[in-house]
Image: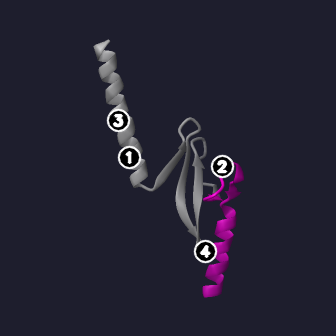
Amino acid sequence: MINANKEFHLQSVEFFSLMEELVKMGCIVKDLEKGLVDFYHRLDDEDVYLCWKLDEKEITAWHRLDTGYEDRKPIAILQRGYEEKLRRLR
């Protein structure tokens, strides 16, 4: 019983240490069970979230700060906007 309790506490400390590292990197863990993580991003003059889920190979979506996972939009929309801005700068 004591060993199980000790192991539980060691794993808890490791878990919260890892969560702290994620927060320091700018990650916002939205749902542990789904593995859902958001990252702040600047879109023109608006803050938005880039959105990633555990089973995804890369970040492919974003949503506004006042919306959630259900309202995700393809990140390609952001890329097109940046490409247009680059063309105008040239």
Q: Assign a secondary structure to mark 4.
A: loop
Question: What count of labels does the image hold?
Answer: 4
Which residue is the site of mark 4?
A: 44
Judge by depth and name the residue closer to the eye, 56 or 18.
18
Where's residue 3, x and y in %? Answer: 29, 16
User: On the rendered image, what quadrant is the N terminus found in?
Assistant: top left
- According to the image, label 1 marks what residue? 20
At 63% across and 74% down in the image, what residue appears?
82
Q: Secondary structure at mark 1?
A: helix
Q: CA distance from mark 2 to mark 3?
A: 28 Å
- Which residue was labeled with disc 3? 14
* Mark 2 or 1, nearer chain start: 1
Do callouts 2 and 1 mark residues in contact (Cβ within 8 Å)?
no
Segment tinted magenta in the rendering: 63-90
Q: Is residue 85 left or right of residue 30?
A: right
Sort mark 2 into few (<14), some (14-19) or many (20+) by Cα contacts within 10 Å: some
Residue at image position (42%, 51%) is 23
Task: Let me know if residue 1 is in the magenta part.
Answer: no
Instruction: From the top left corner, tell me how far across and down residue 2 is, in percent.
Output: 28, 15
For residue 9, side relative to residue 43 (left or right):
left
Decide whether residue 89 is among the magenta residues: yes
Q: For residue 69, which numbered disc appears in the image?
A: 2
Binning the other alpha carbons within 10 Å of mark 1 as few (below 14), some (14 to 19) or many (20 upward) gives: few
Relative horizontal placement of residue 13, taking residue 52 as reference (left or right)? left
State which tag comes first along the sequence, 4 or 3.
3
Q: Indicate the quadrant containing the C terminus: top left, top right, bottom left or bottom right.
A: bottom right
